[in-house]
Amino acid sequence: MICILIAGPLLAQEKYPIPVRTADQKHGRTLSQFYWVNAAGIAFAKSQGVSPYEYGKFCGNLAAPTWGPGNDFEGLVKGIIYNLENFRHVTDAPLIVKENEDGSVNIVASDKQMHRFYPDGKSVVSYEEVKESMKGSFEPIATHMGAKVTMETQDSLLVFRVMKK
């Protein structure tokens, strides 16, 4: 009788239970999936003789029209902030946004934000290739929006500078 009482609940358990996740856990997993697909795209482009930068430009040209009618500097800055914030893991430092005297805007993010997904020697593409792809994607989007975007790494920070043309 005891065996039946113990075995009943064990046998009634689902074989494939749906995991219970927090929103932060779901976001982290979604980020991981996005970064993997991004790496796969860059790796495929490289296998076809296309540099990560040129692949990024291809993606940026596809995306540029979705950023609106164009020539919207504030929209570009807000869009970059929005995207960077969406791709910021809960454990990453908050973004820093600073408007400069010349009207340009600096957006500073921790490079850990992306680097964790492309560990040196343990990813199908390097972190440097991912940054080159990102630089390439910003070019046509910024041009469409009437601006220019630069991206550089300073210590452990990614610094994006958005300038009006």
Image (spheres, helix red, strand yellow):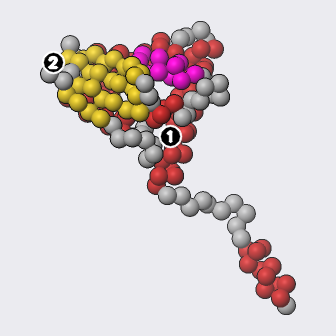
Q: In which quadrant will I find the N terminus? A: bottom right
Q: Amino acid at mark 1?
A: Leu
Three-letter code, disc 2: Asp
* Crowding at mark 2 (Cα within 10 Å: few <14, some 14-19, many 20+): few
Disc 1: which residue: 31
Mark 2 to mark 1: distance in Å?
Answer: 34 Å
Q: Quadrant of residue 134?
A: top left
101 lies left or right of 113: left
The residue tagged with tag 2: helix, strand or loop? loop
Magenta segment's dominant SS is: helix
Q: In terms of image quadrants, where is residue 16?
A: bottom right
Horizontal side of 128 relative to 4 (left or right) equals left
For the residues carrying marks 2 and 1, which lies nearer the camera in this image? Answer: 2
User: Would you call the spot at circle 1 few (<14 residues within 10 Å), some (14-19), or many (20 or more)?
Assistant: some
Q: Is residue 3 magenta?
A: no
The residue under the point 65% across, 62% down is: 17
Rendering coords of residue 65 (x, y %): 32, 23
Q: Specify start and end residues of the magenta stretch as a single range.
A: 126-136
Q: Which residue is mark 2?
A: 102
What residue is shown at x 42% (from left), y 38% (from top)? 87
Q: Secondary structure at mark 1?
A: helix
Residue at point 53%, 11% (across, down)? 51
19 and 154: which is toward the camera = 154
Do we see residue 58 in this rendering? no
Horizontal side of residue 82 vs 74, given as left or right: right
